[in-house]
Image (tube, rainbow, N blue to C red):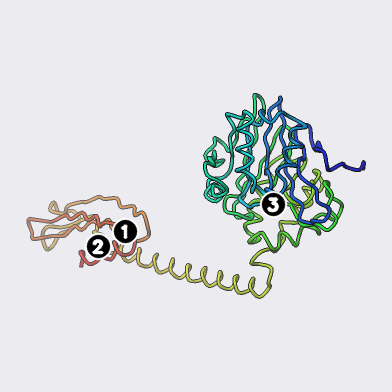
Amino acid sequence: MKEIDYTKPVQVSEHIYWVGTYDPHDKFQCNSYLILCNGKGVIVDSGSTLFLESLLEKVAQLVALDNIVAVVSQHQDPDVCGNIFQLKNILIEVGCQNLTLYTHFRTALLIKHYGRGLVFKHTDKLPAGKAEITSGFEMEFIHTPYLHAPGAITTYFPQDKVLLSSDLFGGVTENWSLYAGENYFEEITSFHKEYMPSKEILLYTIKRLESYDIEMIAPQHGSIMNRKQAQEVMKAFEDFNCGLFIEESFREELHEAQRLIEEQHGIMQQELEMAANFQKTLLPVNRVGLCDVCREDCPEVIDFSFYLKPCNEISGDFIIIDKIDHKHFGIMIIDVMGHGVTSGLATIEIKT
């Protein structure tokens, strides 16, 4: 592979460029990307204040700064978007009057503290999570909750089939290169073990991402993966312990607690079903005789019909039909406020 000049933008797909800053003395490499369509640009994960000047230099080599239409911040960390306030002001000064800042609403709660006047369009409020860059080109935002922030997102660009994955699939590598090598999964496991909270949360997102046609994954840390590498890494993550699940003793403790909860839930469900069956036995029969010696063919036998379908096992809705004397009977329809056991107990008390 031809040696890459990291002092310049690097084209990684038809419409996407790497515009990060390479520091050979820092193994915690931060990547920024520019999506360029029909002369309009979107900056994804603009980076820290340390690299703002370098970012602007690289972007300006590809597109006039006043043609930047959006900046996407995929989560709130300072290495991801610490320069967002300064960047926004510079872009507006050069003429970006319709600049849109995209992030998740949970992330916006924190990013706003980087500078007064930051206003975001929330990715979770967009139709189908999509936003148009320019005519014929759009990007899709995929919420990846708790990987490793509550409002973390990734950005999928369908025209190039590229997933800009932020911290997901990224890593801290000793000998960084823009493109991943054969042992990339081994290089990024320590980062994911520390920063991703649990196997279940990671698996939830991996399963969602498998439905996308991904030709390339471009993370904010670490290296870019091709289709084969991306598929291999996603497969490897399906059986990967991270976060709270790293320590075996904790995993065992957690699984035991989960077993006890499920056991208690089963017992509670059984008891609720028994209570529901008992409540049903208190419902009236469908025939009430007015005289003391009523037979099936007695003209004084009254037929009743009713239908009761509770919301929960135990119901606050109830009906009582009782004989008062040989000429009268009474009907009481009960609707106790609320649902569940408390309401059901009230109906039993009234019946009693």
Labels 3 and 1 touching (C-beta < 8 A): no
Q: Amino acid at mark 2?
A: Thr
Residue 305 placed where, x, y %? 25, 50
Q: Amino acid at mark 1?
A: Ser
The mark closer to the camera, 3 or 2, is 3
Q: Residue at x 70, y 34 (%)?
A: 158
Q: Nearer the viewer, residue 337 or 73?
A: 73
Q: Earlier in the sequence, mark 3 or mark 2?
A: 3
- Assign a secondary structure to mark 2: helix
Residue 336 placed where, x, y %? 25, 57
Q: Nearer the viewer, residue 300 or 31?
A: 31
- Assign a secondary structure to mark 1: loop
Q: Amino acid at mark 3?
A: Asp
Residue 208 placed where, x, y %? 65, 47
Q: Residue at x 28, y 66 (%)?
A: 345
Labels 3 and 2 touching (C-beta < 8 A): no
Residue designated by label 1: 315
Residue designated by label 2: 347
Q: Check residue 167 in the rendering and tell me which mark sits there, or answer none.
A: 3
Residue 66 placed where, x, y %? 66, 28
